[in-house]
Amino acid sequence: MPRLVNRKELVRSVDVKILTDLVLHDVLDSSSDEEDEMLCETDGSSSEDDEQIKIAVVRYFATQSRYLSARVNSPKTKELAYLIFQSDELTFKRNARMTRQAFFAVVDKIGSHIVFRNKSHHEQAPVPDQLMVALSRFGFDGSASSLWTAGSRLGIGEGTVSLYTERVMYALLSLEKTVVTWPNTSERATIKARIEKNQGFPHCLGYVDGSLIGLQEAPSMCGEDYYTRKGSYAINAMIVCDDLKRIRHVFAGFPGCSHDHRVFMYSKLALNPFKYFSGHEYLLADSAYPVSDIIVPTFKKPLANSHENTAFNTAHSQARVIVEQTIGMLKGRFQSLKALRLRIKNKKDHEFAVYWIRTCCMLHNMLLDDEYD
């Protein structure tokens, strides 16, 4: 069960106290005679009224105050952020998850976005600073991607870390249709020729596979649906890539309990295949996917036991390993996808997690030519 913050715990305990007093008061009133009521009025009415007033005051301040105790401002410095930008190439790459040249290329792409402009006289932080904050969350898993850790490393508050991350995601997602694209007719012809030459599969457009994007904690909204066969909580993401490890399609959002087959059947590729495939074009997939005009999976047992089908499965797996390598590259560079440190309490939180996944997939494509170890 999700843990309540101290303020909510206090409000809940006060509500229970008030409800209990009301119930007891009704019970005592119904069972007492006039003499008992006279005694209660003369002896205890004043003390009961004082206690009820105190309870009401406590509840009022608990609901009107964001914090129960006084806030202590922690000392902050932007010296650490400055040192990152002035660091050597290896240190910069470890923090930004990309080379310096690639970093500022991303800044150039999103720097003019309206989200980085204020209508007030108070100017925002420079776009490179905001991007570095967001990347410090995308690129690390566990506590290293927490708001507190990112804020303390870069000399800003937790709320500012969250704000910068949201701005960067919004700016990047505005470019999604130009970065994560389905190949056009000429591109499909080139891809099919490469795959047939290198792997022996004619008319093949690429590879599809599902990946579980882990969650650090169980969602409070329908948490059981996110529970996976691996004993953890996750969001299912279907990823399609070509032979150059470029992500061509992302369909994320189904909870972790969903089978890859089901996720695929609700994707745009399955619902409207004629928009994405023509002729005999198809994708290679593992045995979890259904056999169809656009999907060629491996054989399942017992059919997989025959000599011919075993040879086919071997060649199929050797070709399809590219999508597994692509997912490995994605999670290796943006390690937050191993276990998102996000709390999913409602639909809005779930959508934010999906946007996070799609943003990382976009960055993967933008950084394909940027070597990262």
Image (tube, rainbow, N blue to C red):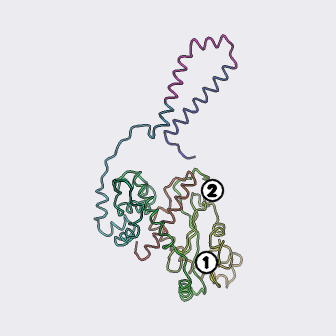
- The three-letter code of the residue at mark 2 reads Asp
Please name which of the two marks, 2 or 1, marks the residue nearer to the observer: 1
Magenta-span inclusion, residue 237: no
Given residues 263 and 201, the one toward you in this image is 263
Question: Measured from the top left, where is residue 64 in percent x and y?
Answer: 47, 37
Task: Report whether 68 appears left or right of 20.
Answer: left
Secondary structure mostly seen in magenta is helix
Q: Label 2 vs label 1: CA separation?
A: 30 Å
- Residue 193 picture quarter: bottom right
Q: Secondary structure at mark 2?
A: helix
- The three-letter code of the residue at mark 1 reads Tyr
Magenta-span inclusion, residue 52: yes
Question: Measured from the top left, where is residue 142 in percent x and y?
Answer: 46, 57
Asked if labels 1 and 2 touch by Cβ distance under 8 angstroms, the answer is no
Q: Which numbered marker is on residue 225?
A: 2
The magenta segment is: 30-57
Residue that sits furthest to the right in the current view = 302
Q: Is residue 97 above or below residue 162?
A: below
Given residues 178 and 263, the one toward you in this image is 178
What count of labels does the image hold? 2
Question: Measured from the top left, where is residue 369 in percent x and y?
Answer: 42, 77
Q: Is residue 201 above or below residue 339?
A: below
Q: Is residue 63 above or below residue 159?
A: above
Given residues 325 and 369, the one toward you in this image is 369
| Label 2, residues with CA under 10 Å away: few <14, some 14-19, many ≥20 | some
Q: Secondary structure at mark 1?
A: helix
Question: Measured from the top left, where is residue 222 in percent x and y?
Answer: 62, 52
Residue under numbered circle 1: 276
Lower sequence index among marks 2 and 1: 2
Image quarter hosting the C terminus? bottom left
